[in-house]
């Protein structure tokens, strides 16, 4: 068994869709970034790559590569799933926490878990997504960005 950890943060800006775990969230701002800026999926990718000792998302999918402009991060997650498989690893489970002051994510959690479980081809019981706020403190508390933490175990 191997364990990996991932962390990511993106700034919230106007005129972008807010996408978390491949689900478009109803909100007046979105995350900025080269891809779709899906901060949760990025954290999961880094947790998986970390568990397998396969470097990180920036090395695998360079942000200056035009191929990844506005790409769905679920496509990148799928590539990472295949990379781990090619290296002989099986994904055991994923646990995550999204840190966002707004919006409330509870209505979206089930759909987010389904997307991740479908993309990684693991059962829903192996995927967990939690959401918390930062109680008004710091840049997340002020609504300037969203962060995500993820842990993955692989065999
Ligand atoms: Zn990111």
Image: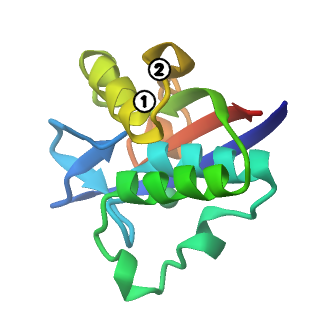
In the image, is residue 2 above or below residue 18? above
Using the image, tell me which numbered label, if any, was put on residue 24.
none
Residue at mark 1: 117
Q: Residue 10's x, y, as percent? A: 46, 56
Q: CA distance from mark 1 to mark 2?
A: 6 Å
Q: Which residue does the image show at 44% across and 52% down from the upper left?
A: 78
Image marks 1 and 2: residues in contact by CB distance under 8 Å: yes
Residue 75 found in image quarter: bottom left
Q: Which residue does the image show at 38% across and 75% down from the upper left?
A: 68
Relative horizontal placement of residue 106, taking residue 87 as reference (left or right): left
Label 1: how many Cα within 10 Å (few below 14, some 14–19, many 20+):
some
Relative horizontal placement of residue 128, taking residue 73 as reference (left or right): right
Relative horizontal placement of residue 73, taking residue 98 as reference (left or right): left
Label 2: how many Cα within 10 Å (few below 14, some 14–19, many 20+):
some
18 or 73, nearer to the observer = 73
Residue at mark 2: 123
In the structure shown, which secondary structural element does the residue marked by tag 2 occupy? Answer: loop
140 or 109, nearer to the observer = 109
């Amino acid at each position: 068994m191997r364990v990996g950890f991932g962390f990511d943060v993106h700034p919230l800006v106007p005129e972008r869709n807010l996408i978390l775990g491949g689900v478009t969230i109803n909100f007046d701002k979105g995350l900025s970034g080269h891809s779709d800026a899906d901060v949760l999926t990025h954290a999961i990718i880094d947790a998986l790559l970390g568990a397998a000792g396969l470097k990180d998302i920036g090395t695998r999918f360079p942000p200056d590569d035009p191929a990844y402009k506005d790409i769905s991060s679920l496509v990148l997650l799928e590539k990472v799933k295949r990379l781990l498989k090619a290296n002989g690893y099986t994904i055991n489970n994923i646990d995550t926490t999204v840190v966002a002051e707004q919006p409330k994510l509870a209505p979206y959690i089930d759909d987010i878990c389904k997307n991740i479980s479908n993309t990684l081809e693991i059962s829903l019981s192996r995927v967990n997504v939690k959401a918390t706020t930062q109680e008004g403190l710091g840049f997340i508390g002020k609504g300037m960005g969203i962060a995500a933490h993820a842990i993955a175990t692989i065999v």
